Image: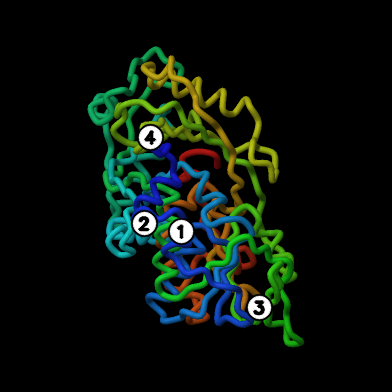
Amino acid sequence: MQPFSAFNLFRRALGGHTSWQAQWRQPSLKSEYDVVIIGAGGHGLATAYYLAKEHGVRNVAVIERGWLGGGNTGRNTTIIRSNYLFDESAALYDHAVKLWEGLSQGINYNVMYSARGVLMLAHTVHDVQSAQRHIHANRLNGVDNEWLSPEECREFCPPLNIAKNIRYPVMGGALQRRGGTARHDAVAWGFARAADALGVDIIQNCEVTAIRRNAAGAVEAVETTKGTVRTKKVGVVTAGHTSVVMGMAGVRMPLESFPLQALVSEPVKPAFPCVVMSNTIHAYISQSDKGEMVIGAGTDVYPSYSQRGALHIAEHTLDAICELFPMFRRMRMLRNWGGIVDVTPDRSPILSKTPVPGLYVNCGWGTGGFKATPGSGNVFAHTIARDEPHPINAPFSLDRFRDGFLIDEAAAAAVAH
């Protein structure tokens, strides 16, 4: 019997082939493309897919330094929700949720989307006021969100401890029933296979070393370890490394990079019915389809490109999880890791044209990247194909930092910022 692994899971999904090459094309890097996408994570692959599917732009290369889905896409905690405060954010994330709901059928690949509900706990009077403000704002934008009492929270999530003598007693919670989870690597593989079938070239193990500009300052080529590619349009979608890649074109970005920690437990039988998040204690938890408890912690406060982060952050998170869910106190942790998140001054993403003609950037998602994957790819593809923003991502331009039209979502991220 073959060992259970993500690789074998996808091998079986592809019909028993021993590798993705058995069913996918194995393209060589061509000398010229209409569009080059740098970064084969969820957002980059989604962008390529929607460029081909909705805009007919199929002479596209997705260039990846490592392997597809090997960056933040493979290191996130898979949560999907759209209960953000500001109108601009609600529109973007709810656009993504609507796409999530039909994504498996749309790309003909099971991304394991599960609308199990996201419950965001309140532990203080300020938490309660903030959560109820979000609920009212969400409803005005047509986004589902509702307030639950402590007893209703426990009814929705039976393992939750609502005793009044714990350090952070539960005073209620905001529930988005349409929220939930999907499987991160399935999302990457699904978009990759769908884009490949439409003629997109996915080039792995190919590092971009320079972005060349012509005498007029516009993009003219991308230099890689596999050769030079001529192109007039480049989309940069490299979470955690955006400043480095954009620097190749002479563009400085308003970003800081932080390690964001997460961990999983040993697999157990189904025991946890939903996603629970807590801003006050900087922790969130759900159960994966393999049975692991997926636990997210906060960001390390020190800018870094390490994929570890400080040990005390994970310890604090586990203390809080064990207090809220005493049944997990004797559970063993299987592994922990850190992903690198780019954070903007207003804690909202950038989906934008840049001052360099033909150069576009998708970055700055902080903790919000995975949940936005299909929506981000959809509107970013529109921006690249038409050289103008989609109405949904128009507010998320680079110009907002110059003009002062910020989208301050620091309180809506639930953890980390």
- Where residue 324 appears, x then y in whole percent? 40, 21
Image side of residue 308 versus residue 279, left or right: right
Residue at (38, 21) in percent of width and height: 325
Q: Which mark is residue 20?
A: 1
Badge 2 or badge 3: first in the primary sequence: 2
Query: Looking at this view, is 346 or 155 the one in front?
Result: 155
Q: Is residue 87 visible?
A: no
In the rendered view, tell whether residue 162 sits above or below residue 192. above
Q: Which mark is residue 331?
A: none
Q: Which mark is residue 286?
A: 4
Residue at (33, 64) in percent of width and height: 107
Question: Which residue of the protein is positioned furthest toward the bottom in this rendering?
Answer: 216
- Amino acid identity at mark 1: Trp
- Amino acid identity at mark 2: Leu
Q: State how far apart marks 3 and 1 are (Cα).
A: 25 Å
Q: Quadrant of residue 65?
A: bottom right
Q: Is residue 72 visible?
A: yes
Residue behind mark 3: 229
Question: Which residue of the protein is positioned furthest toward the front in this rendering?
Answer: 1
Q: Quadrant of the C terminus?
A: top right
Badge 2 or badge 4: first in the primary sequence: 2
Residue at (36, 17) in percent of width and height: 327
Badge 1 or badge 2: first in the primary sequence: 2
Q: Are marks 1 and 2 in contact (CB under 8 Å)?
A: yes
Image side of residue 301 versus residue 98, left or right: right
Q: Tell me the element at label 1.
A: helix
Q: Tell me the element at label 4.
A: strand
Mark 2 or 4: the one toward you: 2
Q: Quadrant of the N terminus?
A: top left
Total tally of numbered discs in the picture: 4
Badge 3 or badge 1: first in the primary sequence: 1
